Image (spheres, helix red, strand yellow):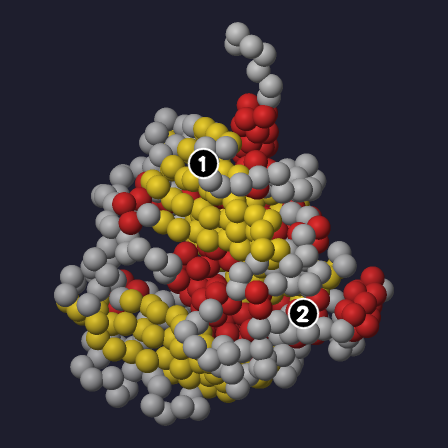
């Protein structure tokens, strides 16, 4: 379902962008306030509630035994799923994940997987027969824009605080996680780049670019979305923004 | 498939290409009779068909937009297109690719000229060998032009990646499996506007910039082949030729 935006509001946001201003009075490269609470759900091995301004997302980690995939018999399994719950927005409907939910989950998955944050090869129990599966389920609670960053942050926070006590016959000293990949999404409105779009901005943006980076400044995943385009210079600027904002956000993460 | 010891030997890739070299590319426009527009593209061992239906009445009607046409894309892999049979129907990967394909193509289509209509793009992967989403986008834009849909430009698309610490253009299957990064890109070639960008793996900022340059260069070659295919399709041949 689409959000209906009045043309007055659309023109207002687009016009503000021309003056390098934003509807919530932030500067173009200002991220909203980040709040992370971890370990709030006792039946999950790891959990995190992330607030990004008014956006709220909760992620839970469950770890279970499973059979490995045939193409990686000695590796653990990472599964990321996202639910756009109807309680989070009037535009979300119940039912199986739609393309937005699938894209969201897959972008978060790639950010974590490709950074090598989790040592999946340590999660084998008996190669070819049994491995540990790490399920990350992300539930949107309140949608005020930039669900991708909020979800990625909730997922990595929950994983970093995953406790292995209580998992029956756990095989390792601890949960093998090392890196802190951080995703930063930048929207383009009227030719201006603005980080961490709120919902009003998301509704009128031309395009967005999500860049996941690790501590050393290297890129581990990217995804462009929306029906607009980016120039090469805009992408390079988006990378600069992603690096500096990620460094700040990383301080909030475990 | 076992991991080869090296993916680049003496500056050449395992299929003999240089790092900035694309696979063999073949594009044909207007290959299907019933579709309003169609294209067939081979990039190396990829074989991809694209068909366009529309602009036509949009069904279901509640999806009609009063001020614009709606573009729909479906990326579909045939069960026999890959080594192990793929279960038919959309999986999560196909759903995501269909979405980013639509977003890659939509900026060039004058949808606002066809209120209440639908334009459907169907991409069928017959044989897959890494790079099917970009090959599909390349094919889809030729099929749209073949259908006579008004467009600002074509869309050319190619992937770059990193294998053995070298940034290379147009990954093949082995390089996709064993390489460290993969970055599919789609471009409006005349203005160099980027309409698709995905990446997974590991890039330093310098490698990212170099990758963009390689992709831009690859898209130029694809653009020429796309225009050539359309010219061949619509050129008037004098009798006796």
Distance Cα–Cα, label 1 vs label 2: 38 Å
Q: Is residue B133 above or below residue B27?
A: below
- Quadrant assignment for the N terminus of chain B: top left
| Residue beneath the point at 24% across and 50% down | B85
| Residue beneath the point at 42% across and 84% down | A47
Q: Residues within 10 Å of mark 1 (few under 14, many from 20)?
A: some
Disc 1: which chain?
B
* Residue A102 visible: yes
Q: Is residue A160 above or below residue B59?
A: below
Identify the mark at residue A216; answer none if there is no mark. Answer: none
Q: Residue B8 appears at what percent x and percent y? A: 36, 34
Mark 1 residue element = loop
Identify the mark at residue A203; answer none if there is no mark. Answer: 2
The residue nearer to you, when weighing A76 against B224, is B224
| Residue beneath the point at 58% across and 55% down | B57
Q: Is residue A143 above or below residue B31?
A: below
B191 to the left or right of B185:
right
Disc 2: which chain?
A
Mark 2 residue element = helix
Q: Is residue A37 above or below residue A18?
A: below
| Residue beneath the point at 20% across and 84% down | A168
* Residue B185 visible: no
Q: Residue B239 appears at what percent x and percent y? A: 56, 10
Q: Residue A142 appears at what percent x and percent y? A: 57, 84
B4 to the left or right of A14:
left
The residue that mark 1 highlights is B32
The residue nearer to you, when weighing A98 against B194, is A98
């Amino acid at each position: 379902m689409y959000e209906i935006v009045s043309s007055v509001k659309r023109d207002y946001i687009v016009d503000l962008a021309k003056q390098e201003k934003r509807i919530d009075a932030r500067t173009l490269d200002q991220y909203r306030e980040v709040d992370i609470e971890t370990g709030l759900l006792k039946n999950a091995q790891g959990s995190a509630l992330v607030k990004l301004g008014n956006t709220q997302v909760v992620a839970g980690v469950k770890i279970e035994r499973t059979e490995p995939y045939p193409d990686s018999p000695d590796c653990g399994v990472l599964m990321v799923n996202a639910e756009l719950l109807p309680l989070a927005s009037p535009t979300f409907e119940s039912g199986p994940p739609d393309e937005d939910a699938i894209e969201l989950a897959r972008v978060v998955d790639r950010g974590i997987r490709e950074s090598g944050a989790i040592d999946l090869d340590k999660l084998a129990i008996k190669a070819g027969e049994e491995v540990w599966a790490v399920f990350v389920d992300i539930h949107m609670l309140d949608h005020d824009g930039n669900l991708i960053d909020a979800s990625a942050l909730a997922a990595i926070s929950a994983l970093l605080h995953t406790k292995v006590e209580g998992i029956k016959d756990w095989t390792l000293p601890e949960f093998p996680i090392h890196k802190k990949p951080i995703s930063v999404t930048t929207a383009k409105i009227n030719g201006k780049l603005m980080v961490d779009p709120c919902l009003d901005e998301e509704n009128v943006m031309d395009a967005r670019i999500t860049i996941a980076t690790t501590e050393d400044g290297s890129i581990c995943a990217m995804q462009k979305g929306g029906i607009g385009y980016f120039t090469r210079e805009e992408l390079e600027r988006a990378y600069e923004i992603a690096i500096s904002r990620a460094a700040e956000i990383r301080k909030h993460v475990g | 498939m076992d991991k080869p010891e090296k993916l680049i030997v003496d500056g050449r890739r395992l299929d003999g290409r240089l790092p900035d070299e694309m696979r063999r590319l073949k594009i044909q426009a207007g290959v299907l009779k019933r579709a309003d527009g169609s294209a067939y593209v081979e990039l190396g061992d990829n074989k991809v068909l694209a068909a366009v239906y529309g602009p036509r009445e949009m069904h279901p009607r509640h999806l009609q937009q009063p001020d614009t046409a709606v573009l729909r894309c479906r990326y579909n892999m045939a069960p026999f297109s890959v080594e192990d049979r793929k279960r038919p129907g959309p999986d999560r990967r196909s759903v995501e690719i269909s979405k980013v394909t639509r977003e890659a193509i939509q900026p060039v289509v004058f949808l606002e000229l066809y209120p209440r209509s639908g334009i459907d793009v169907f991409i069928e992967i017959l044989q897959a060998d890494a790079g099917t989403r970009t090959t599909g986008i390349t094919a889809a834009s030729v099929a749209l032009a073949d259908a006579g849909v008004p467009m600002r430009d074509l869309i050319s698309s190619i992937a770059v990646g990193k294998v053995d610490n070298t940034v290379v253009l147009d990954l093949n299957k082995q390089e996709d499996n064993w390489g460290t990064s993969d970055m599919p890109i789609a471009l409006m070639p005349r203005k160099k506007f980027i309409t698709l960008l995905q990446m997974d793996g590991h890039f330093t900022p310098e490698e990212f910039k170099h990758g963009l340059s390689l992709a831009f260069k690859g898209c130029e070659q694809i653009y020429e082949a796309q225009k050539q295919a359309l010219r061949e399709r619509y050129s008037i041949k004098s009798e006796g030729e």
